[in-house]
Image (tube, rainbow, N blue to C red):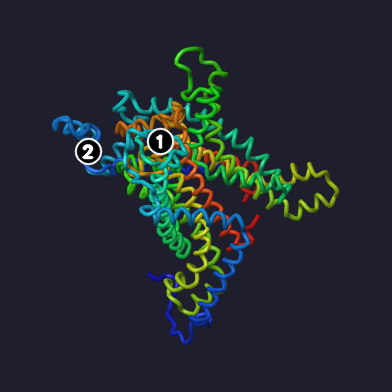
Amino acid sequence: MMTLVLQRLIGLIPVLIGITVVVFALMQMIPGDVAQAMLGLTARPEDVANLREALGLNEPIYVQYFKWLSRVVQGDLGISLQQRTEVLPFVLGRFQNTLILTIAATIISLLIGLPAGIISATRQYSIFDRLSMLVALFGNSMPAFWLGLMAILVFSLRLGWFPTGGMWPMVGDRTLPVLLQHLALPAITLGAASAAITARITRSSMLEVIRQDYVRTARAKGLNERIVLMRHTLKNALLPILTVVSIQFGFLLGGAVLTETVFNWPGIGLALYNAISFRDYPVVQGGVLVVAVAFVMVNLFTDLLYAVVDPRVRYG
Amino acid sequence: MSTVVSEPIKQLSPPGGTTALDRMSNRQSQLGLIWRSLKRDRFALVGGGIVLLAVLCALTAPWISPHDPLAQNSQIRLSPIGTDDHILGTDGNGRDILSRLIYGSRTALMVAIVPVLAAGMLGMVIGLAAGYFGGWVDSVLMRFCDILFAFPAILLAIAIVAALGPSLLNAMMALAIVFIPAFARLVRSAVLTLRTREFVVAAQASGAPSQRVIGRHILINVVPTIIVFATLQTGQMIIFGSALSFLGLGVQPPTPDWGTMANDGRNSMLIAPWVTTIPGIAIFMVAVGFNLLGDGLRDALDPTMKT
């Protein structure tokens, strides 16, 4: 197990380097002069020249990359042009809020998707199966930002059950029930599409296992159907489902950008959205970097979880 | 560069001994089979119908829309659904929603189909090269894909557009880049299984050059998989494209687009919910259409995948 962990960690290095190259390259894609773009067209030429010098834009590109990389490794992602504070603490603070939203959405996605997929698989072609797969297809076709707007329209504006956005009220206590009240709509919106995908993949993964010989043997032995499902089927169907959960987590991290914008949730997505409008490129760069690294870590974690769940991966 | 074939052998007969005529009739009957299977699948037909309707709307927009989609009229701002002369009402600038919806199908389809085509082509080339040649070509290309895969798709697309500047063209380019690795991996894995099949080995043994083996024997068998995947991806891309426009990163106002239309109505949602609701339903319907059609195509092309 230790060797596996080490192997995976070493395998991570080229991907992480690749991520930094892409994030760095993103900023090179800004057409024209970055310093000019940051300061706007009305900036004085000497200010632009000073910023160019400060950003090291006059040096060759590979020198710029390595200088930037050495700062990033030390945790220095630059200064936000809009907030006038360091980017890393700001981005990490916002990322915490995104994590709260993403984890809540993942839980909702699993709570709906897993049972729906399992029941569909055990009753293939039943009314429940057809209906839930149709709902899953609809969920998969629903633009999350629009679903969010509709949720606000119905449950906040019309019924007044939930706040229209934000994470905390302007005044009042910051307690868990208050947080949950603010979290409900964005988490359900974000989790809905993901629940659809989870249900579809759980179903097909279960169906594949149900057709295996050992499941037939277990049934032929006269085992209780519940035991067959839980011990023989679900356990072996879990691997593909684990993959889905990890892919979904990344999908949700990305989707959070849209949901956060709609619900004004103070996460990294909203920060990125605002940073883009203000041409606050250091925050855009830092935010994308943090999310990508987090995404890679989630994938690594899933890989290792595989090894724990499935001995074939460990010894194979 | 052909690295696989060591020595060209003069061919006396075409590989596999089939004539062009044979192959054509084979292909036609395969298409016939697919069509017969699709015809039986009611869901797929509904999906195909929706897609066809959207395409027709986009093609005939200038003739079928009742008003100019850009014409503003402050006297009839936020007219409700069912108003005389404005069946779906008007938006905050007094523009006819039905006309904007019809014109909006153009950008909605374009921002979905163009990136899928571009990503499909590039991904196919990368996947073919990686799968067929293997070795360092495979390693380099797949590491490139791994790195792109390390970013959540929509986030990378947003970051690319943020850097390039918001516009329809840049949004399409960003979406294409983001979807390349998915196509490349799909094609690569298909090629890997095909590469060891007898007919491919036979073609290689008969001295066919790499480009011929790839073109005649591998590509043709990969194409159906790509078509299914591309159809399903188009459904997702409609949502992604409209999301970019919704954020103000894609289609720029006043050009009618479903994503920007949904955003336009946000501030008047309580008094005029239709302004936001209607374009959202359109996005949803077209995405459902592509998803149903894609599922049907998958079942028709490969019945073993049917669940």
Q: Is residue B70 left or right of residue A2?
A: left
Image x and y of residue A233, in percent: 72, 46
Neighbor class of circle 2 (other Cα within 10 Å; few <14, some 14-19, many 20+) is: some
Question: Secondary structure under badge 1?
Answer: helix
Q: Is residue A148 above or below residue A18?
A: above
Q: Is residue B185 above or below residue A34?
A: below
Nearer to us in this view, B173 or A132: A132
Image x and y of residue B163, in percent: 31, 41
Question: Secondary structure under badge 2?
Answer: loop
Nearer to us in this view, B30 or A22: B30
Look at mark 2 in the image and give the residue it sits on: A57
Label 2 marks a residue whose chain is: A
Spatial CA distance of label 2 from label 1 is 37 Å
Query: Which residue corresponds to the image point at 30% horizontal and 26% vertical from the top-left?
Result: A82
> Is residue B146 at all visible to an observer of this figure?
yes
Task: Tell me which corner region of the image, top left, top right, bottom left or bottom right, holds residue A248.
Answer: top right
Image x and y of residue A52, in percent: 20, 35
Q: Amino acid at mark 2?
A: Leu
Query: Which residue corresponds to the image point at 22% horizontal and 31% vertical from the top-left?
Result: A39
Q: Is residue A205 left or right of residue B94?
A: right
Neighbor class of circle 1 (other Cα within 10 Å; few <14, some 14-19, many 20+) is: many
Tag on residue B112? none
Question: Which residue extends farthest front?
Answer: B84
Q: Amino acid at mark 1?
A: Asn
